[in-house]
Image: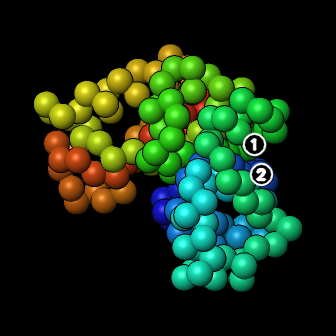
Amino acid sequence: MQRFSYAFAVNPKIHRTLLIGGGAFAYPRYYLAQYPDCQIDVIEISEDILAIDQKYFSLDAIRNERMKIICDDGMRYLQKYADTYDLIINDAFVGSAEMCRDLSAVQLIHRHLNEHGIYLVNAAVSVKGLFSTKYRHFDTILKREFKETAMMQCDEQRSLYEKQNILMIASDDSLL
């Protein structure tokens, strides 16, 4: 999850982030500690996951005015509200619109990005070979919607032919 910080290297003016998929809230903990001048909205679809986070991971210990927790489907939330963000991270693996990875979902996410905003997606895919269909399809969608795209392996030792976590990054600004 520390690889998500790549966005801050590209755009150090990030102040407001949306994380779709809270999970065990590992990234929000890191984010709050690393970026004391920033705020994060975290969408988690599962009330059960939030209850587990509360019981076993002391979610109340990290709750503060810089983190808003929303129990909802990420796409439903974006359809209902007009909030905009400097960074949207999609770390969801369940929910609507194929985990926010179809064209209409990407267009909706793009509308919720501020100028110079970055969309970052954690995807479990193969980048090359017979099983790279999902990666190639989503890469095509990102390239259709954004001016710049990039891909970053989370574990550079792994072969691009094997399924792994990669970050797919998109913006209308340079990603270098």
141 to 58, vertically: above or below:
above
Which quadrant does the C terminus fall into?
Answer: top right
What number of labels is visible?
2
Q: Residue furthest top?
A: 144
Q: Residue at x 53, y 69 (%)?
A: 24
Q: For mark 2, does the 10 Å Cα neighbourhood hold few (<14), some (14 to 19), or many (20 or more) residues?
A: many
Image side of residue 149 versus residue 27, left or right: left
The answer, for residue 174, to whether it is visible in the render is no
Residue 26 point in image, percent of width and height: 55, 70
Of pointers 2 and 1, the one earlier in the residue sequence: 2
> Mark 2–mark 1 contact, CB under 8 Å?
yes
Helix, strand or loop at mark 1 = strand
Q: Which residue is mark 1?
A: 85
Q: Residue at x 73, y 44 (%)?
A: 86
126 to 148, vertically: above or below:
below
Residue 159 point in image, percent of width and height: 18, 50
Q: Residue at x 28, y 57 (%)?
A: 156
Q: Which residue is mark 2?
A: 16
Q: For mark 1, does the 10 Å Cα neighbourhood hold few (<14), some (14 to 19), or many (20 or more) residues?
A: many
Q: Nearer the viewer, residue 30 or 54?
A: 54
Distance in Å between CA atoms under marks 2 and 1: 5 Å
111 to 124, vertically: above or below:
above
Residue 34 point in image, percent of width and height: 67, 72
What residue type is disc 2 on? Arg
